[in-house]
Image: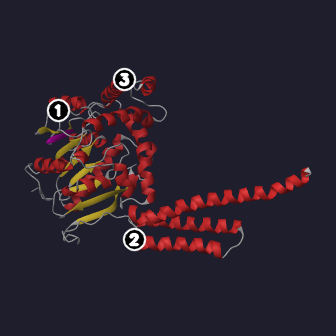
Amino acid sequence: MSSQEFESSRAPVASRIVRLAVWGAVGVLAVLLFALVAIAPLTTGIPVWVGLLLVVVDGAVLVGAFRGLDALRSRSLALLVGVTAVAVLTVLLSQILAYTPPIVDDSGRPLPGSIASLEQVELNGSSQWVTIRGTSRENPVLLFLAGGPGGSELPSTRKHLGALEDDFLVWDQPGAGKSFTAVDIGWLTPQRYRADAVALVGHLRTRFDKQKIYLMGESWGTILGIWLVRDRPDLFHAYVGSGQMVRTTENDVMGYELALRYLEGRGETERLERLRRKGPPPYQSGNPILTYADYLDVLNRIMSERAPGEGESHDILIDALLAPEYGFWDKVNWVRGLAKVFNVVYPQLEDLDLTTQAAEVEVPVYFFVGRHDVNAMTTLVEKYYAVLEAPRKEIVWFEKSGHTPLYEEPRKWVEMVRSRLLETPVSRDRGSGR
């Protein structure tokens, strides 16, 4: 066989390989986009009937591409364009149709007089998202400040702390979840968070005719929470801090050293040496969240071994991925918010020391502390508690918990919040000050 004849025989084989590669790539992409459409009713606010309609349209695109066209290129292009268009429509609908589930009675019907609202509010020139949930509009307002910076626990608080919906509200902070684009992330500062929080409290006081509200912070939210009750005690009845941060740099160095001891004790020499090479925090350069995550992952292992909780599983990432409050694009921003906002805001907290910067507040303070918390060191919380001057203060220990007792022991958490906050003299005040 001549070289020319050999090359000619190879041409059909090469053509078939190219055809298979094209179909394979188009097929994989089409399956992924079809899967996104199929799971929409399970993971977003898109109703089941709308989801089924979108699946039918996707099927029609597939049938049309094969029946109406003969050429491979035309079929591939038609299929790709069609499934992409349906997927884009699905993403848009998931954003538009996002909602927070209604509060229902024992028969599953919306509870008369209740409120379950997912809405935007204007705070200092930016539109930010809040959920407002409660069995009655007359109940006291409890504002929850999520962890992070850049975190959002909007669906997790609804899922695990729903029993508090007599007096529960969640603010999705700028740079997190649905509010990811509310503020230019590069310009986020602790001062901006404080100003926006005060503006939100003002909005709540006006809307619900309250002179004061209750405040709860988790992890990073405890820093913001203490700042608020320190600077504006006139706005709040009481404060609850969970995973209370006190001195960020000292806390992080203690966590880093604990991680080294843990790895050394288990003979994990490779990871131990990697942490040693990075050195102790604080971390400012590169991608700080990934550097912190290297030893924080070890601390999470420690807490999972020691803190059994109440036996209920919890994962705020899974909660976010399945939440009807978040469209598909919000879910992407949930992850982006954690990474990007943390890197901007957390390095600005390097000099935080609440023992000197907030040694006195004029509202009752309750620290809800997981006994096995090594993310926010309990020894530092105890030191802060010792020097803190407040009208009333208390540490409530959660013996089965690590950093997140609100999710690890939610039943006890709800009981403690109710008993502590409703002990305050004014629990159902009106705008007149009653």
What kind of residue is marked 3? Glu
Q: Where is residue 205 shown, x and y percent of the image?
A: 21, 57
> Mark 3: which secondary structure?
helix
Mark 2 or 3: the one toward you:
3
> Mark 2: which secondary structure?
helix
Q: Residue furthest bottom?
A: 68
Is 279 inside the magenta-drawn segment?
no
Residue designated by label 3: 264
Residue designated by label 1: 385
What kind of residue is marked 2? Val
Mark 2 or 1: the one toward you:
2
> Which of disc 1 and disc 2 is earlier in sequence?
2
Residue 403 versus residue 287: which sits nearer the camera? 403
Q: Quadrant of residue 377?
A: top left
> Mark 1: which secondary structure?
helix
* Image: magenta residue range: 364-369
Q: Residue furthest front?
A: 1
Please state if 280 lies on the left or on the right of 164 as rendered. Answer: right
Residue 105 visible in rendering: yes
Distance Cα–Cα, label 3 vs label 1:
32 Å
Mark 3 or 1: the one toward you:
3
Residue 103 versus residue 193: which sits nearer the camera? 103
Please state if 58 lies on the left or on the right of 424 as rendered. Answer: right
Residue designated by label 2: 48
Label 2 environment density (alpha carbons within 10 Å; few <14, some 14–19, many ≥20) = some
Label 1 environment density (alpha carbons within 10 Å; few <14, some 14–19, many ≥20) = many
